[in-house]
């Protein structure tokens, strides 16, 4: 299952990618919005774990783009700064879930697999 | 009744003298005691000064008018008496002059005839004791009367000489040959041969005296006649008998009736109204003590003083009531203002803390996530089959990693709670029976209360109207406050949950425990996040903060009252109905 991990916190996203890999996922890491958009154009993913605050833009913009161009891809918002307004906005834009950091990898894996089964 | 009592209390009891007043004074509010005293003093000066001045003027004027009226009355009495006495003397003199014209000397020389003339005079006019006819040599050649005075010689007697010289004369009172006080009236005539002679009559002193004693001179007043030497010519009630000195100064001559004030020989101040009697040596005096002269003014004076006294009491009472009521009103208003300011200050502080807590929680979440993932990755590397190095990890290493992960999870819980204090919470509004919700929560805590020997009483009337609110939040509020109360009663006690309809504000839910209480210096901080007095990591210090946020979220208010070692009461006021609303962090804490 191909997963796009979008987060500017390298120390976090690198470890998460490796842990997901250990659990049978095939993660690809993007450290900012432009990398994410390029990755989305280059290949297709089953799911995306997306941070809200990115150095060169908002995760919401990436979400909008993803919903337009990859409507089948499940998008999970994962943020340390999430407010309720952010949650409403993202859920309104079509995110599957809105998770606050820190999150256990097992829980995240379950969420992703749920999507995988659905797909 | 209670409203009337409250109104009466606010008019009569100065609330601001209580110790709490000093708290307000410290906060820069007015010094109510001084304000109150100043108000009383100013109002008293403004209203009592005119009253006192008017009373004093009235007192003086009324006294003066009463005094002059009394003088006038006494002078009038004297004036009337003068007319009477003058008429009496003039009449006697006229009778003698008439007799001179009608009778001849020769006839009157006959004592029998003179006695007949005396009888006629007595019958016609009265007031005459005897009659005498005296030759120019002073020999009384004819006498009619009760005494034996025939042929007596009056040649060297002063009145004889004066009468012969003046032609008509009224004498002082004197003793004479008869050795009895009497006065005479004498007129001069001429015999057929042209020789002078005198016809004289003795005046009836008793008739004279009666005329004066019949005068209205008052209880302690006196009316009498003195001569120019101040000797009494008629008896006096207070100043002695006939021929004694009266003991009052002889007044200066005056054509008219006049008066003066003097002190008599008894030391009493007296008003003397007097009149000189024409063609006689007499001075008529009406004497009254000035104290009696003013007796008529006594009643108006008492009335005036009563009126002034009653006015004084009424004004002072009104001033006290008005000043107390006004100062109480200002005090109440300022107290409310201070309470609002205090609440706003607390709310503002909590809002700031809320924003800060939210910011901190968000910033901590990212490094927490790094720690979590990195530690998790190490654990994965040690435990997951695909990444095992083949060597067994050092003993306890995985356990230590698990402790790190647990701690991270705990931190995550705390940041979530912090965000719960400050961020939006979704509400599900439904119609609720507050009693049922509260009793439902208490079922979970009954065992613990029993274990701690704490009795829980629920006093929520069955007829309390249902409220429209969020069940889950209400349960959490109740749970937090009851748990808090149970923890405050380590050695047993009682907890009372009561609810009442609070007109205009909704429902007031009261949690009263008999626990250890909260120190006064902690009361203003108990809703602050992380503020705890439990120590030893027993409490997170977020329970009451979250409760505060929830109550505000439900559109209500929470206040606390506490007394050390007596207990604490939390009062949660909730609206009867609330619309579902969206609020942000400021809404919750503000």
Image (cartoon, coloured by chain):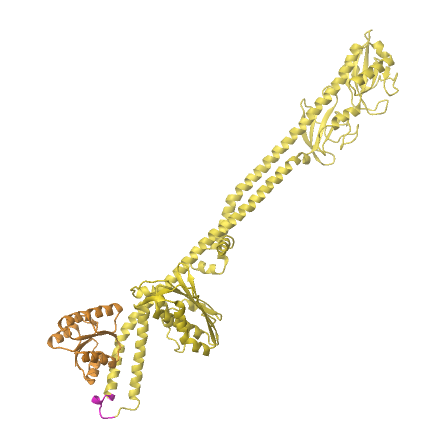
Chain colours: A orange, B yellow
In this rendering, the answer to whether B31 lies above or below B358 is above
Q: Residue B229 vs residue B20: left or right?
A: right
- Nearest the eye: B152 or B48: B48
- Identify the residue at horizontal 32%, vertical 72% (top origin): B418
Residue closest to the far bottom: B391
Q: Is residue B350 visible?
A: no
In this rendering, the answer to whether B355 lies above or below B374 is above
Percent position (x, y) of residue A105? 24, 81
Looking at the figure, which quarter contains the C terminus of chain B? bottom left
- Identify the residue at horizontal 27%, vertical 73% (top origin): B363
Residue closest to the far left: A42
- In the image, which residues are magenta? B382-391
How many numbered callouts? 0
In this rendering, the answer to whether B218 lies above or below B449 is above
In this rendering, the answer to whether B166 lies above or below B533 is above
The image quarter containing residue B261 is top right
């Amino acid at each position: 299952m191909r997963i796009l991990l979008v987060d500017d916190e390298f120390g976090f996203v690198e470890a998460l990618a490796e842990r997901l890999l250990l659990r049978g996922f095939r993660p690809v890491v993007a450290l900012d919005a432009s990398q994410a958009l390029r990755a989305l154009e280059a290949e297709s993913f089953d799911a995306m774990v997306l941070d809200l605050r990115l150095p060169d833009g908002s995760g919401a913009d990436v979400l909008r783009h993803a919903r337009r161009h990859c409507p089948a891809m499940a998008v999970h918002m994962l943020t340390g700064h999430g407010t309720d307004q952010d949650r409403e906005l993202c859920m309104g834009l079509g995110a599957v879930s809105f998770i606050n950091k820190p999150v256990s990898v097992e829980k995240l894996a379950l969420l992703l697999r749920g999507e995988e089964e659905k797909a | 009744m209670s409203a009337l009592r409250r109104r009466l209390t606010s008019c009569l009891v100065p609330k601001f003298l209580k110790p709490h007043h000093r708290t307000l004074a410290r906060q820069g509010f007015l010094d109510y005691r001084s304000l109150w005293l100043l108000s009383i003093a100013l109002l008293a000066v403004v209203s009592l000064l005119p009253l006192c001045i008017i009373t004093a003027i009235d007192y003086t004027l009324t006294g003066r008018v009463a005094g002059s009226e009394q003088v006038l009355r006494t002078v009038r009495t004297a004036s009337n008496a003068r007319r009477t006495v003058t008429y009496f003397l003039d009449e006697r003199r006229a009778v003698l002059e008439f007799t001179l014209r009608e009778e001849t000397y020769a006839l009157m020389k006959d004592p029998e005839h003179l006695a007949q003339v005396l009888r006629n005079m007595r019958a016609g006019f009265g007031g005459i004791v005897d009659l005498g006819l005296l030759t120019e040599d002073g020999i009384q050649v004819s006498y009619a009367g009760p005494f034996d005075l025939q042929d007596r010689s009056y040649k060297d007697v002063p009145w004889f000489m004066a009468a012969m010289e003046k032609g008509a004369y009224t004498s002082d009172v004197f003793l004479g040959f008869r050795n009895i006080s009497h006065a005479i009236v004498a007129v001069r005539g001429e015999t057929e041969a042209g020789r002078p002679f005198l016809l004289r009559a003795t005046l009836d002193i008793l008739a004279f005296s009666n005329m004066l004693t019949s005068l209205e001179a008052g209880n302690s007043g006196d009316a009498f006649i003195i001569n120019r030497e101040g000797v009494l010519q008629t008896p006096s009630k207070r100043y002695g008998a006939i021929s004694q000195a009266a003991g009052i100064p002889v007044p200066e001559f005056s054509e008219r009736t006049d008066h003066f004030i003097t002190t008599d020989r008894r030391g009493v101040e007296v008003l003397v109204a007097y009149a000189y009697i024409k063609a006689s040596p007499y001075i008529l005096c009406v004497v009254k003590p000035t104290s009696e002269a003013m007796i008529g003014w006594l009643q108006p004076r008492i009335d005036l003083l009563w009126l002034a006294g009653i006015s004084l009491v009424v004004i002072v009472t009104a001033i006290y009531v008005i000043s107390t009521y006004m100062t109480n009103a200002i005090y109440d208003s300022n107290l409310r203002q201070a309470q609002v300011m205090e609440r706003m200050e607390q709310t503002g502080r909590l809002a700031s803390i809320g924003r800060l807590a939210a910011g901190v929680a968000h910033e901590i979440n990212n490094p927490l996530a790094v720690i979590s993932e990195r530690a998790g990755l190490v654990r994965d590397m040690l435990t997951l089959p695909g990444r095992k190095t083949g060597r067994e990890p050092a003993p306890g290493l995985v356990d230590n990693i698990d402790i790190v992960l647990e701690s991270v999870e705990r931190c995550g819980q705390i940041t979530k709670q912090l965000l719960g204090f400050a961020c939006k919470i979704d509400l599900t509004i439904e119609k609720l029976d507050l009693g049922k919700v509260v009793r439902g929560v208490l079922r979970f805590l009954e065992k613990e209360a029993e274990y701690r020997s704490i009795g829980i009483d629920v006093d929520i009337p069955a007829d309390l109207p249902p409220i429209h609110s969020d069940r889950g939040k209400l349960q959490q509020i109740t749970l937090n406050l009851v748990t808090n109360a149970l923890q405050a009663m380590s050695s047993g006690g009682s907890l009372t949950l009561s609810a009442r309809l609070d007109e205009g504000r909704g429902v007031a839910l009261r949690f009263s425990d008999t626990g250890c209480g909260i120190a006064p210096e902690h009361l203003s901080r108990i809703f602050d996040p992380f503020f705890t007095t439990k120590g030893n990591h027993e409490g997170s210090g977020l329970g009451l903060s979250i409760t505060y946020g929830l109550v505000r979220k439900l559109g209500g208010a929470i206040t606390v009252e506490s007394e050390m070692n007596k207990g604490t009461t939390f009062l949660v006021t909730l609206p009867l109905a609330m619309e579902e609303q969206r609020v942000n962090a400021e809404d919750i804490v503000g």
